[in-house]
Image (cartoon, rainbow, N blue to C red):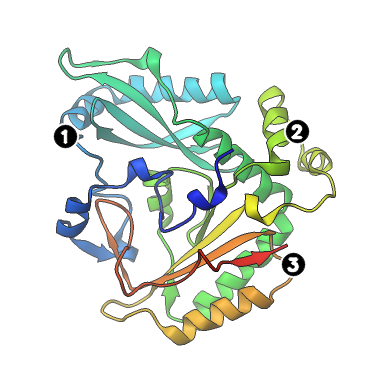
Amino acid sequence: MKSIFILVSSLILAGCSAWTASEENEKTRDYIPVQDYTGQGYDLPNGDKTDQIAEEHAEEIETAVVRFFKEEYKTDVEVHNMVGAEGEVSVFVESKGKPHFYSFAIVPIDTRNQEVLTDEVWSQEYQVEEAIMSGLYAWIKEDEFDKLNDYIASLTTEYPITGLQKEALENVGAGYYMTRYYNVPVGGGKLEHLLKAYLTNPERTKEEWTRLLGTEPIDPNMVTITLQLYMEKPNIPPDNVIFNKIVEDIENMTGIPAGTYGIYLHDNEINQSSGQNNKPNTLEKSLPDPIIKN
């Protein structure tokens, strides 16, 4: 089982490092205010040719991906966006109803023959499974996540900070249960048997999922909750006072979901091509010294 710590780090939208734009692009593409970012300009290597082919075959790609998620993962999804890459198009989706999560599938494209290989849709190893577990965890622990959400809402009211736009999650949110302010990668542990139950019968109630999870505590090393916050106004560096306040609050808070917490406070900008802010002025509380909540 891959470690959850491999998944957290500085990725904001992408499901894994393979989705990150090249370092050259990261240096040369412009940053824009996070409030203006809806996923436009998100770039995968060598996607120009496949972007055009995907646009011409958008309807059949959407049909194939919806069918793939239903057949392989027993999940109804809505397609939000398609981004071309070398020999393929990555298709970003959102689950309908609960458990709620974002994910993606990959559709191969034969650029020489201008064909979309809709019978060969696939997903990266364990990516969708992890997203399902993440969504189930957030649903089962809904009250605890509500408390975390209420806290973040109070922060954004009191301090000049913000999060991603919902459209950015929809268009380039590659995985997990996600909100505008955090994402929740899950590595397995107790949640692994929920995944097996879901793939057998996803039509269970929240109460049934809660009973299946049981009362034994969740291993916090198997769940990562990564807060990604941004300064509300441009040309202002991340505020140390606000950052230290958030870290202290999370360290002392009770009744929020068990997990390993990482906290990032960025300035106001985000890179269009990668959907990230990797600037050196970002303030962070994460590995090797994250916040552990049991």
Between the C-alphas of marks 1 and 2, the distance is: 42 Å
Between the C-alphas of marks 2 and 3, the distance is: 25 Å
First-in-chain label (1 vs 3): 1
- Give the structural element (helix, strand or loop) at label 2: loop
The residue to which callout 1 is attached is: 48
- Give the structural element (helix, strand or loop) at label 3: loop
Q: Amino acid at mark 2?
A: Arg
**Height in image: 237 above or below 265?**
below
The residue to which callout 3 is attached is: 255
Q: Quadrant of residue 153?
A: bottom right
**Residue 68 in picture, x, y percent from top left:** 48, 21
Callouts 1 and 2 close, C-beta under 8 Å: no
Q: Quadrant of residue 62?
A: top left
Asked whether residue 140 is in view, the answer is yes
**Height in image: 19 above or below 123?**
below
The residue to which callout 2 is attached is: 204
Which of 178 and 283 lies nearest the eye of the viewer?
283
Residue drawn at x 73%, y 62% is 294
Q: Amino acid at mark 1?
A: Asp
* Quadrant, the N terminus: top right
**Residue 58 in picture, x, y percent from top left:** 30, 26
